[in-house]
């Protein structure tokens, strides 16, 4: 009996030891994999030229992403800290730092005053395979803007157009249940928009990124169109469920429809500068203020600070001529709402702004155009993805992606061009010689980068760097 018990005890001990050893081996293997990924993908900083002390006073944050592995990095006062996540939560995915964005559609819809006559004259015509259209003609149109923001949508009227001669319009005679009620084919719209459209306004009425404004979302309305002035507006879209619940208010043949000219959601004026020819950017700033950047009638770029009541509290001229065409800027990622760095698109210009005590405490433009000290380095500025102002307010740290071509270069095929690092340059705001150049290595040349020479088409090379935005600028579902 004792021998049986001893055997059972031995079996139990051996089983426990085996399980423990297996768990230890699995844990060691997992740790090895994690450390292997970490050593492969960790972001490192290499000094290339100048004094590394020039990085002091700067803060820049971001992440490197490859497949399901993320390396989060924080460059501060010349030091680089990193953390690593293998298969992170959805809330920390690659879009965690995305700025709000909006997409648009422009509809050339039959004006309300003539839609009954247009519908009465419409003919049901076989169109494609088993589909049919209601076809007619019209000369009175209302141009409608559909703006998609996050999970919502708003539709507003842009302007009315009366043509000298009618043109063809059509709508689907029968509409599948899955087709969205905002589809251009849901109601009568112009078959060809050339006679109706104004390319100067109908597709470029929103400038810059969507930004937070009070408890909602703001957008910069670029031009004065009809009775809507150029300025900053608070946008309140409706959900798609609310859109589906809107009642039909028109006919296509005998089918009840929501008219393409029906407005929904709201776009309320917040701040419209009296002398604005183009409004190009809005951005939330410190102390509950909002930044508004615009061109005046003399094409001079200006910036206003606006309080929560929509009143101007400070104004500066940026010393930039906008020219007669479109003037656009991009608000680059930032780590504080005290500062803003604006990149003037298609030109080697950066505007650095700082707000303190409710006023502009600093504004400076950095240009590579015509500056002998910056010749040959404008590539860094033209392709920059991030630029931050230092604590002293006398220099910018600019980050530009570095790309590597793997295999045979082909001008018609960019599928073998990958981002393998990020070049960092410290530019004094006075335009003098750069103080520092360095390189953030995102690990691409340590893992797949060196192996793609023969089979780069078969690799999931989604390896890139992006930059952290200030909390107010991050994407949130409202």
Image (cartoon, grey):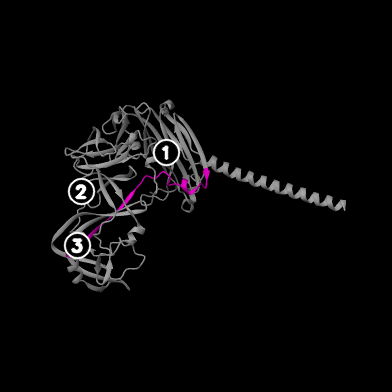
Q: Nearer the viewer, residue 261 or 417?
A: 261
Above or below for 227 versus 359: below
Specify whether residue 327 is in view: no
Secondary structure under tag 2 reads: loop
Secondary structure under tag 1 reads: strand
Q: Give the class, few, some or many, for how many residues have Cα within 10 Å of label 2's Cα (few <14, many ≥20).
A: some
What residue does disc 2 label? 228
Spatial CA distance of label 1 from label 3 is 54 Å
* Pointer 1 or 3: first along the chain: 3
Q: Are marks 1 and 2 in contact (CB under 8 Å)?
A: no
Above or below for 68 versus 138: above
What residue does disc 3 label? 112
What residue does disc 1 label? 422
Q: Position of residue 75 (x, y in %)?
A: 45, 33
Location of residue 379 by image quarter: top left
Above or below for 320 versus 103: above
Q: Nearer the viewer, residue 70 or 276?
A: 276
Spatial CA distance of label 3 from label 2 is 20 Å
**Residue 287 lies within the magenta run:** no
Q: Is residue 281 left or right of residue 114?
A: right
**Residue 111 lies within the magenta run:** yes
Q: Are marks 3 and 2 in contact (CB under 8 Å)?
A: no
Q: Are marks 1 and 3 in contact (CB under 8 Å)?
A: no
The span shown in magenta is: 85-114
Q: Nearer the viewer, residue 374 or 470?
A: 470
* Pointer 1 or 2: first along the chain: 2
Residue at the (44%, 46%) spot, across then down: 94
Q: Nearer the viewer, residue 375 or 190?
A: 190
């Amino acid at each position: 009996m004792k021998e049986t018990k001893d055997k059972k005890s031995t079996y139990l001990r051996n089983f426990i030891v085996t399980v423990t050893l297996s768990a230890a081996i699995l844990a060691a293997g997992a740790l090895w994999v994690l450390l292997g990924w970490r050593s492969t993908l960790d972001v490192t900083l290499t000094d290339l030229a100048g004094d590394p002390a020039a990085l002091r006073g700067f803060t820049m944050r971001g992440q490197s992403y490859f497949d399901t592995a993320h390396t989060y990095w924080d460059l501060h006062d010349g030091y680089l800290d990193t953390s690593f996540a293998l298969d992170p939560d959805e809330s920390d995915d690659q879009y965690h730092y995305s700025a709000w964005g909006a997409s648009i559609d422009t509809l050339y819809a039959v004006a309300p005053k003539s839609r009954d006559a247009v519908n009465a004259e419409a003919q049901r015509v076989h169109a494609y395979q088993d589909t049919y259209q209601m076809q007619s003609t019209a000369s009175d149109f209302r141009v409608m803007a559909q703006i998609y923001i996050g999970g919502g949508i708003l539709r507003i009227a842009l302007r009315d157009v009366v043509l000298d001669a009618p043109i063809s319009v059509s709508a689907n005679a029968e509409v599948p249940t899955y087709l969205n009620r905002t589809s251009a084919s849901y109601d009568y719209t112009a078959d060809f928009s050339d006679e109706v459209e104004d390319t100067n306004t109908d597709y470029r009425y929103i400038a810059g990124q969507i930004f937070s404004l009070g408890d909602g979302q703001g957008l910069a309305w670029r031009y004065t169109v009809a009775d809507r002035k150029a300025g900053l507006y608070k946008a309140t879209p409706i959900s798609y469920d609310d859109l589906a619940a809107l009642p039909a208010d028109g006919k296509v043949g005998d089918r009840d429809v929501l008219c393409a000219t029906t407005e929904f959601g709201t776009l309320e004026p917040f701040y419209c500068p009296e002398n604005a020819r183009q409004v190009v950017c809005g951005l939330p700033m410190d102390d509950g203020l909002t930044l508004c950047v615009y061109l005046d009638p003399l094409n001079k770029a200006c910036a206003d600070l606006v309080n929560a009541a929509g009143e101007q509290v400070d104004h500066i001229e940026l010393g930039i001529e906008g020219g007669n065409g479109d003037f656009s800027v991009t608000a680059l990622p930032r780590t504080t709402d005290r500062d803003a760095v604006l990149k003037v698109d298609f030109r080697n210009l950066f505007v650095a702004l700082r707000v303190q005590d409710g006023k502009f405490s600093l504004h400076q433009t950095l240009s590579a155009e015509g500056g002998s000290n910056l010749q040959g380095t404008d590539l860094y500025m033209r392709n920059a993805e991030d630029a931050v102002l230092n604590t002293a307010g006398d220099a910018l740290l600019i980050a530009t992606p570095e790309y590597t071509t793997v295999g045979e270069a082909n001008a018609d095929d960019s599928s073998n061009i990958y981002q393998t690092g990020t070049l960092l340059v410290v530019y004094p705001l006075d335009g003098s010689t750069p103080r520092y150049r360095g390189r953030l290595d995102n690990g691409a040349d340590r893992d797949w980068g060196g192996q793609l020479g023969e089979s780069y088409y078969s690799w999931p090379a989604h390896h890139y760097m992006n930059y952290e935005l200030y909390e107010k600028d991050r994407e949130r579902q409202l």
